[in-house]
Image (spheres, grey):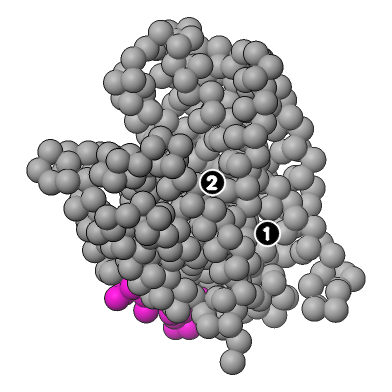
């Protein structure tokens, strides 16, 4: 295999480019759905309240897909599961566009959520394989590419809507393009044996598996315990839930905060989410270099601390410019945190990377959905900006427990290390 000046093979570089493609495709597909929500709502003849309930089906489908595809990825490999998941997500995109009633739209969102959940976990599991091959952090840049896909969807969707295209026509065309992209990128994905390391490591692993099988015959309980998800993974999943809830708060409430609390004009209020999202994207492109220099623990500890300071500034600020600064700092601080959790889960056990990532991604996704569900009821008892101290507290918890990201050599965990 030809290797570049940094010791990275051409096949590994191609796999990295393909992974970028799948992350961008996922962000683009979900962004196209979001852009067309008003038109789809009108076509189905439903109210905002009904749409809110239907969106729970989208989340439920994603959660189920994540739990199904995690073990499947470990069993048959991400090289097979990622393109199939991308094809499923692409094909399902057209369904909301042709739904004409509440029942059809509900089924469409369940299918779209299922495809999105499958693609989310499988592409992150493959990203862990790529990161293992590079021997340095590369995960955050993949997540930044997802955000870029969403921005591209907003631009494309705005153009097609200005042309008067129907949701069915636009989403149908995008579905076909997504199917083509899923197939074209598939050959570049890594085979399972390439991600498993060199021959010596594989032989050692085989010997350990053989010994474990012999021990399992004598002690079935020990064999069952080995298949159990470690408590550390559940702790990572809990942190993902808290931090993605923080992200969901910014997505759903940042604009309302400036408009309702600070009486900012609608156009100015919209800048709150734009500032947050831009800081998140830029921060994720930079986070890999910082993680390579200082390590993932520093990214989570200081990133969550910066996020807590940023959201506190936004919540307490009486001035719109200062609040916008706070939302920007909040996005910059959060930007590198979630990718570190996904990476740690995937590297904790190479043989169960898909399952572990599905646990972290699944609870994290529930946290994202819980943002509006938690903050909304709290506003009946306190001002909106005061409710933001709940996500501030979650950021503080993440900062104080960042040591959980330290690798555990005793369990055979291998992570890209910080440079000395």
Q: Secondary structure at mark 1?
A: helix
Does residue 401 belong to the magenta stretch?
A: yes
Q: In this image, 374 relative to 247: left or right?
A: left
Spatial CA distance of label 1 from label 2 is 18 Å
Q: Position of residue 81 (x, y in %)?
A: 62, 44
Which of the two residues, 207 or 294, is positioned nearer the viewer here?
294
Q: Determine the residue positioned at 29% across, 21% down.
A: 49
Q: Is residue 279 above or below residue 137?
A: above
Task: State whether residue 253 appears in this view.
Answer: no
Q: Position of residue 254 (x, y in %)?
A: 36, 46
**Where does the N terminus fall, quadrant-wise?**
bottom right
Does residue 194 belong to the magenta stretch?
A: no
Q: Nearer the viewer, mark 1 or mark 2?
A: 2
Q: Is residue 406 above or below residue 86?
A: below
The residue wearing badge 2 is 120
Q: Secondary structure at mark 2?
A: helix
Which of the two residues, 280 or 185, is positioned nearer the viewer here?
280
Residue 289 tag number: none
Q: Determine the residue positioned at 69% across, 80% down.
A: 200
Quadrant assignment, res 45? top left
Labels 1 and 2: the sequence-earlier one? 2
Q: Is residue 232 above or below residue 364?
A: below
What segment is highlighted magenta in the picture? 398-415
Q: How many marks?
A: 2
Which of the two residues, 291 or 283, is positioned nearer the viewer here?
283
Quadrant assignment, res 128? bottom right
Q: Position of residue 328 (x, y in %)?
A: 45, 58
The residue wearing badge 1 is 192
């Amino acid at each position: 295999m030809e290797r570049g000046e940094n010791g990275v093979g051409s096949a590994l570089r191609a796999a990295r480019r393909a992974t970028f493609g799948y992350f961008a495709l996922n962000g683009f597909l979900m962004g196209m759905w979001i852009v067309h929500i008003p038109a789809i709502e009108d076509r189905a003849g439903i109210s905002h309240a009904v749409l809110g309930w239907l969106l729970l089906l989208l989340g439920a489908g994603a959660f189920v897909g994540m739990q199904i595809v995690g073990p499947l990825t470990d069993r048959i490999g991400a090289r097979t599961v990622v393109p199939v998941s991308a094809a499923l997500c692409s094909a399902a995109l057209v369904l909301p566009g042709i739904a004409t009633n509440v029942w059809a739209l509900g089924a469409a969102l369940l299918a779209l959520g299922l495809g999105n959940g499958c693609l989310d976990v499988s592409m992150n599991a493959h990203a862990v394989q790529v990161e293992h091959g590079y021997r340095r952090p590369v995960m955050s840049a993949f997540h930044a590419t997802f955000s870029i896909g969403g921005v591209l969807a907003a631009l494309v969707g705005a153009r097609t809507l200005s042309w008067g295209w129907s949701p069915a026509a636009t989403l149908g065309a995008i579905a076909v393009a997504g199917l083509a992209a899923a197939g074209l990128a598939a050959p570049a994905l890594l085979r399972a044996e390439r991600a498993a390391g060199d021959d010596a490591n594989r032989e050692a692993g085989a010997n350990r598996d053989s010994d474990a099988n012999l021990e399992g015959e004598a002690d079935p309980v020990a064999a069952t315990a080995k298949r159990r998800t470690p408590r550390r993974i559940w702790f990572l999943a809990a942190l993902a839930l808290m931090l993605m809830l923080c992200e969901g708060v910014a997505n759903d409430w940042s604009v309302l905060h400036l408009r309702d609390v600070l009486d900012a004009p609608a156009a100015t209020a919209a800048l709150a989410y734009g500032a947050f999202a831009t800081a998140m994207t830029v921060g994720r492109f930079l986070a890999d270099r910082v993680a390579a220099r200082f390590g993932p623990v520093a990214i989570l500890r200081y990133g969550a601390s910066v996020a807590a300071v940023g959201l506190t500034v936004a919540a307490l600020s009486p001035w719109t410019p200062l609040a916008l600064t706070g939302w920007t700092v909040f996005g910059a601080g959060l930007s590198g945190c979630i990718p570190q959790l996904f990476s740690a889960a995937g590297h904790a056990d190479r043989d169960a990377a898909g399952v572990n990532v599905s646990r972290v991604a699944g609870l994290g996704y529930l946290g994202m959905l819980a943002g509006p569900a938690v903050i909304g009821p709290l506003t009946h008892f306190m001002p909106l900006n005061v409710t933001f101290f709940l996500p501030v507290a979650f950021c503080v918890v993440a900062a104080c427990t960042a040591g959980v990201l330290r690798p555990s050599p005793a369990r055979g965990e291998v992570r890209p290390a910080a440079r000395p």
